[in-house]
Amino acid sequence: MRISLPAAFVASVLLLDAFLHLFWLVRPAADPRALSLAVLNFETPFTARVLVPLIAMLTVAALSVIAVSLGRGGRLAKAVTLALGGGLLVRAELGLAWAFGLGTDTGTPFYWLNLLLYSPLCVALGFATGAVLMRLSSRRSKHEAEADWCSVRPCCTAARYSNADVQQHASTASVCHLTRRKTSLRGDWLLFASRKSGVRIS
């Protein structure tokens, strides 16, 4: 089983984002305040205590999407993927509000990054994540249908072979009955002939 195109798209973007956070962790930005305002629209320290959990979350989310696409990971991977899709759609809605100038200054770098990159990317990622989950649901429905068919098929096969056996048995019984009938008629003819000729047959 191969990873689907939507899952590959989502996982690639998430891993790229994790790599960017790792890069900021290894090589801190010259102006963390400007970077924070451009990325998040508010000030936050780009320290290990902030970046390491983000890197871990992005990596786990990417691996969960891949696992769900391959039909693995169980309920945990599905729950993480579902939470990821919901979070992306919420972020897209917030980005739409920011695109209309609500809660942000239209002259800041964040406004244009949100309008041209962040929000469209979140919308695309949200729909791609939904496609991964829908494909998982359709695959499960197909497997359940195949399982139901496999559970019914042996009964049908057994019934079919039982009917064939009954027909064969009936045919064999008819042949045996005809054979016995011929033997009986032959015996009656011999007895009749012996009585006429006076010969006794033991």
Image (tube, helix red, strand yellow):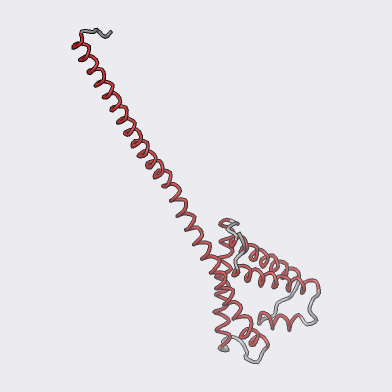
Nearest to the observer: residue 104 or residue 56: 56
Nearest to the observer: residue 115 or residue 172: 172
Vertical position of residue 80 compared to residue 95: above or below: above
**Residue 37 rendering spot, x and y as whole percentages:** 69, 83
Nearest to the observer: residue 40 or residue 166: 166
Nearest to the observer: residue 120 or residue 49: 120
Vertical position of residue 55 compared to residue 200: above or below: below
**Residue 92 rendering spot, x and y as whole percentages:** 56, 78
State which quarter of the image contains the N terminus: bottom right
Q: Residue at x 59, y 70 (%)?
A: 6
**Residue 199 rendering spot, x and y as whole percentages:** 23, 8
Tally of numbered discs: 0
Residue 119 left/right relative to 109:
left
Residue 162 left/right relative to 31:
left
State which quarter of the image contains the C terminus: top left
Q: Residue at x 78, y 79 (%)?
A: 29
Q: Residue at x 56, y 61 (%)?
A: 78
**Residue 93 rendering spot, x and y as whole percentages:** 54, 79
